């Protein structure tokens, strides 16, 4: 049973250790929209919306999500009773187009609430909902790092070397036209051909760049993530037919339907599942099941989440279809100080442990720090 009594929206500004650059823009500090949800029995759940300040990755931002939550989504759940989080998901998506990130924040809070009510870890609740037997659920998850665009190829190559030494299972490099083939050549020259690398273009190329993209086949990459337009499948299908490196879709996958179309069209061979991008855990579980059925590897991407969003991602990544390392860097990679206790850490072999001992996401929220970082706040209470 999910019966939400109150919802608090907060936007915080979380200072970053270093700017993060992708082909379509840079992030210097991370505005993060947080939800604190309380149910009729007094259980509290936290969740995070992955929208950013600018619509340069997705059409959504923290401000559009705030609006959608306030105007259309929160009124659908506040004071209502739902049998389970899937019913919440259904209520949120009914006759509502888009707003995946806003929906996801509320939907994921419902799963977190359920975990607290059942006194189970979030990973356990998701594993059970997916029908996965306990021995098949991962106790620890392999971590990869996503490196933003660097100014020079020397700086990039050194950085890759350093992160591999830190234990990361995979290094993903952001690329864009003019910072691709030469940069990769410099990296391979320094770290060798055997280390697991991938690239992410964040939609910076078109089919006019076919020669450059085909040249990437020479680098033995695990995958090329989202080379073409953010909402495209057809051009990716044409590109995949002309390349040997597997394409992985990120931005183009907004749900099970686009994942199915990707498979049918051969528009990619790997899926990056970000629960915050696809509307939440219900849809993530559907994509996970579909991909398992078709032998398509999935992995859990990241959106520079705080420790709250990371917790939700780690729980999802414990499912068996997540066979590739996730972008699940520990707290200290992005933040001087995270907003959860304990902070997320990775061992020297590049593993993060899935918390299963405590109810819910397995980390406590640092309310004082959140209060100190809050730039706006609004409370919605059942009347
Ligand atoms: O495309 O995966 C992406 C961050 C912001 C926007 C888009 C992306 C990313 C990342 C960060 O790659 C991964 C992480 O959170 O560690
Ligand atoms: Mg990506």
Image (spheres, helix red, strand yellow):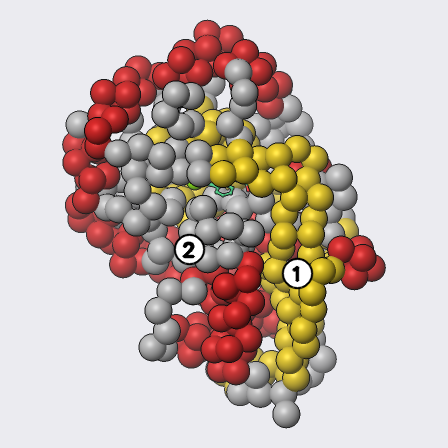
Element carrying mark 1: strand
The residue most toward the bottom is 383
Asked if residue 132 can be seen in this view, the reply is no
- Name the image quarter holding the N terminus: bottom right
In the picture of the structure, the residue carrying the numbered disc 1 is 11
- Residue 125 is left or right of residue 216, and the answer is right
Residue 51 x/y as whole percent = 52, 55
In screen coordinates, is 133 left or right of 350?
A: left
| Label 2: how many Cα within 10 Å (few below 14, some 14–19, many 20+) | some
Image-based side of 339 in relation to 128, left or right: right
Which residue sits at x=42%, y=21%? 179
> Which labelled disc corresponds to residue 240?
none
Question: Quarter-wise, where is residue 154 in the image?
Answer: top right
* Cα separation between marks 2 and 1: 18 Å
Q: Which residue is mark 2?
A: 59
Q: Earlier in the sequence, mark 2 or mark 1?
A: 1
> Residue 173, how many percent across, how many down?
47, 27
| x then y, percent, for residue 165 | 62, 19
* Image point (62%, 55%), residue name: 32
Residue 64 shows in the view: yes
């Amino acid at each position: 049973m999910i019966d939400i009594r109150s919802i608090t929206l907060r936007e915080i500004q979380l200072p970053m250790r270093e700017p993060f650059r992708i082909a379509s823009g840079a992030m210097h500090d991370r505005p993060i929209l947080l939800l604190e949800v309380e149910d009729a029995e007094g259980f509290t759940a936290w969740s995070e919306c992955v929208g950013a300040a600018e619509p340069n990755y997705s059409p959504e931002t923290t401000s559009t999500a705030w609006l959608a939550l306030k105007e259309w989504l929160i009124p659908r759940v506040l004071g209502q009773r739902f049998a389970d989080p899937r019913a919440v998901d259904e209520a949120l998506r009914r006759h509502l187009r888009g707003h995946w990130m806003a929906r996801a924040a509320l939907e994921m809070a419902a799963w977190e609430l359920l975990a607290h009510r059942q006194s189970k870890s979030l990973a356990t609740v998701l594993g059970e909902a997916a029908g996965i037997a306990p021995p098949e659920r991962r106790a620890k998850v392999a971590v990869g790092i996503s490196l933003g665009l660097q100014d020079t190829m020397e700086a990039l190559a050194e950085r890759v070397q350093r992160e591999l030494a830190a234990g990361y299972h995979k290094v993903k490099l952001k690329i864009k036209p003019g910072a691709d083939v030469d940069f990769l050549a410099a990296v391979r020259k320094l770290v060798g051909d055997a280390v697991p690398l991938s690239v992410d273009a964040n939609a910076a190329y078109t089919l006019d760049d076919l020669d450059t993209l085909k040249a990437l086949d020479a680098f033995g990459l695990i995958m090329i993530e989202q080379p073409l337009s953010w909402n495209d499948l057809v051009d990716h299908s044409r590109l995949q037919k002309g390349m040997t490196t597997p394409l992985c879709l990120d931005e183009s996958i907004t749900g099970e339907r686009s994942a199915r179309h990707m498979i049918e069209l051969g528009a990619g061979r790997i899926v990056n599942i970000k629960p915050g991008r696809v509307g939440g855990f219900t849809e993530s579980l559907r994509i996970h099941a579909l991909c398992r059925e078709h032998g398509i590897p999935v992995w859990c991407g990241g959106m520079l989440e705080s420790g709250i969003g990371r917790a939700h991602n780690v729980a999802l990544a414990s499912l068996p279809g997540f066979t590739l390392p996730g972008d699940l860097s520990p707290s200290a990679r992005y933040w001087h100080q995270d907003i959860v206790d304990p902070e997320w850490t990775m061992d020297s072999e590049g593993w993060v442990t899935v918390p299963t001992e405590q109810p819910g996401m397995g980390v406590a929220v640092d309310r004082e720090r959140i209060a100190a970082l809050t730039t706006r706040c609004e409370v919605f209470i059942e009347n």
